[in-house]
Amino acid sequence: FMLDVCLVGTGGMMPLPYRKLTACMTRFNGHSLLIDCGEGTQVGIKERGWSVKPLDAICFTHFHADHISGLPGLLLTLGNAERTEPLLIIGPKGVERVVNSLRVIAPELPFPIEFYELNEKEHVIEMDGYKIEAFYVKHNVPCYGYNMIIPRAGKFDPVKAKENDIPMKYWNRLQKGETVTSEDGRVLTSDMILGSPRPGIKLTYCTDTRPVQTISEHAKNADLFICEGMYGEEGKEKKAREYKHMTFYEAAHLAKEADVKQMWLTHYSPSLVRAEEFMGKVKSIFPRAKAGKDGKTITLDFQEE
């Protein structure tokens, strides 16, 4: 079980010749997920050599154009690839209305779209062996951060299996998470032979928000924390507060507080040409920080104890 993560685009506001707009794609066990879909997303996925075909769901943080302007074209591509399986689209209040408005140019699609509207402070959506957590953040329109979590069962514990009197022939099925009824009519579950759950894989993605505590709480111990850093230059704090964005340094403090394994910055202001220039100061706050760039990819794996 591995999670591939690609930061498809890292730009905020407008695409630049060397920077596409915001999007992040993950692949797990034959399933793909997209968070945001700015202009240039399709090209970025193609450049990476990945495919949009196995896409299960698209999660939108919010409905500003730089996060959703690539959607109509992507839907048309999926339609042209003769997709018939439903596509799930997750997003803040009004998601169905917003997407259907954009579909004026993609009215005929060979697959249904299902909508999941976020209207609480927190949501948990389980699908295909992973878990999506959405949590409300602080921007000038309703906006959510996302966790993608791949849970991991506990280790097989033969002592526990014997104590619970579980016949060996059921061990394999129970380890796979099945529930089995034994010959003597007992209902057997995997927790009867497994130790406590082990840490799985966790990706936290958060953009277009002020640094609020709910972010560091949800990002706690993430394997990778992808976080907005709109501004790196000195003296941009006032602008960040006014437009409800974050500086590199605010992002670094969140990463430190959440004690994540590593952080990538994204969603750069068009005026920010070389993010690398500011990384010295960022790393003095949080040493495991990296400047995200278009196409940056990592494979996250279960950690061995």
Image (tube, rainbow, N blue to C red):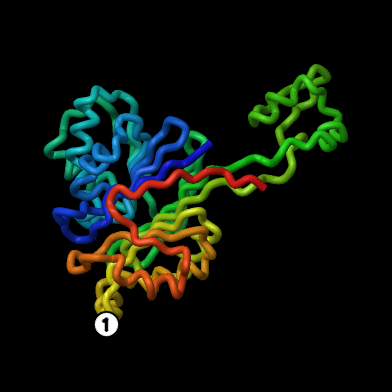
* Position of residue 143 measured from the top left corner of the image (x, y, whole percent): 34, 59
Report the side of 17 relative to 35 (left or right): left
* Position of residue 291 measured from the top left corner of the image (x, y, whole percent): 34, 61
Of helix, strand and loop, which one carries label 1? Answer: loop
| Quadrant in which residue 284 is drawn | bottom left
Kind of residue sitting beneath label 1: Gly
Compared to 274, does 163 lie above or below? above
| Quadrant in which residue 71 is drawn | top left
What residue sits right under mark 1 in the picture?
235
Compared to 300, does 187 lie above or below? above
* Position of residue 101 measured from the top left corner of the image (x, y, whole percent): 17, 44
* Position of residue 112 measured from the top left corner of the image (x, y, whole percent): 29, 30
Foreground pick, 218 / 11: 11
Q: Residue at x 43, y 60 (%)?
A: 263
Q: Which residue is drawn at 49% across and 45% down?
A: 300
Q: Which residue is drawn at 12% across and 38% down?
A: 105
Report the side of 171 relative to 16 (left or right): right
